[in-house]
Amino acid sequence: MKKVNLSYLKEMSGGDQTIVQEMIDIFKDQVEEFSHDMEELLNKKDYSSLGKLAHKAKSSISIMGLDELSGDMKVLENLAKSGKETEKYPGLVDKFRKETKEAVEELDEVLQNLELFL
């Protein structure tokens, strides 16, 4: 089952291949950094910073149409900012890592056939 829904990206870019490619490349770099930083903040129990990072991540993944994961990041953002239900954080961070890894694999395929996508 496909993870990404690129209709927003397609609409936002006006079908410009260069813009789509740049946005995908930025996303790939960002999610790798977000995954690393989330893990680090979780280990340090820096929940306030984790909540802020989840907020930033939510924007990036929304552009790629990862709506369910975006909702999960909203949950993580709200819980972490308040320091509540800390037992849920590792599962949400793991889900972020797993789903963005799958999304990156899909996006790599899209990049190989970008003209078909647009």
Image (cartoon, grey):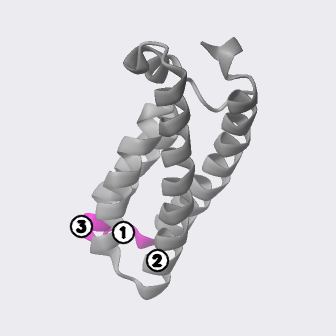
Q: Which circle marks residue 93 in the picture?
A: none
Q: Which image quadrant for residue 17? A: top right
Residue 71 at x, y = what percent?
42, 40
Q: Observer-nearest residue: 5 or 14?
A: 14
Q: CA distance from mark 2 to mark 1?
A: 7 Å
Q: Residue at x 65, y 41 (%)?
A: 103
Which circle marks residue 42 in the picture? Answer: 2
Counting residues from the start of the chain, the first of labels 3 and 1 encountered is: 1
Would you name the residue on which mark 1 appears?
50
The foreground one among 69 and 19 is 19
Crowding around mark 2 (Cα neighbors within 10 Å: few <14, some 14 to 19, many 20+) is some
- Sequence order check: which comes first, mark 2 or mark 1? 2
* Residue 41 lies in the magenta-colored region: no
Which residue matches tag 3? 82
Query: CB under 8 Å between callouts 2 and 1?
Result: yes
Mark 2 vs 3, N-terminal side: 2
The reply to whether the C-beta atoms of the residues labelled 3 and 1 are less than 8 Å apart is no
Left or right, 109 with reference to 97: right
Please, what secondary structure does the residue beneath circle 2 have?
A: helix
Pick the front one: 22 or 92: 22
Amino acid bearing label 3 = Ser
Question: Compared with residue 41, is residue 34 higher up or lower down, i.e. above or below?
Answer: above
Quadrant containing the C terminus in the rendered view:
top right
Q: Is residue 23 visible?
A: yes
For numbered disc 1, what is the local secondary structure? Answer: helix
Q: Quadrant of residue 2?
A: top right
Camera-nearest label, 3 or 1: 1
Q: Which residues are magenta?
A: 80-87
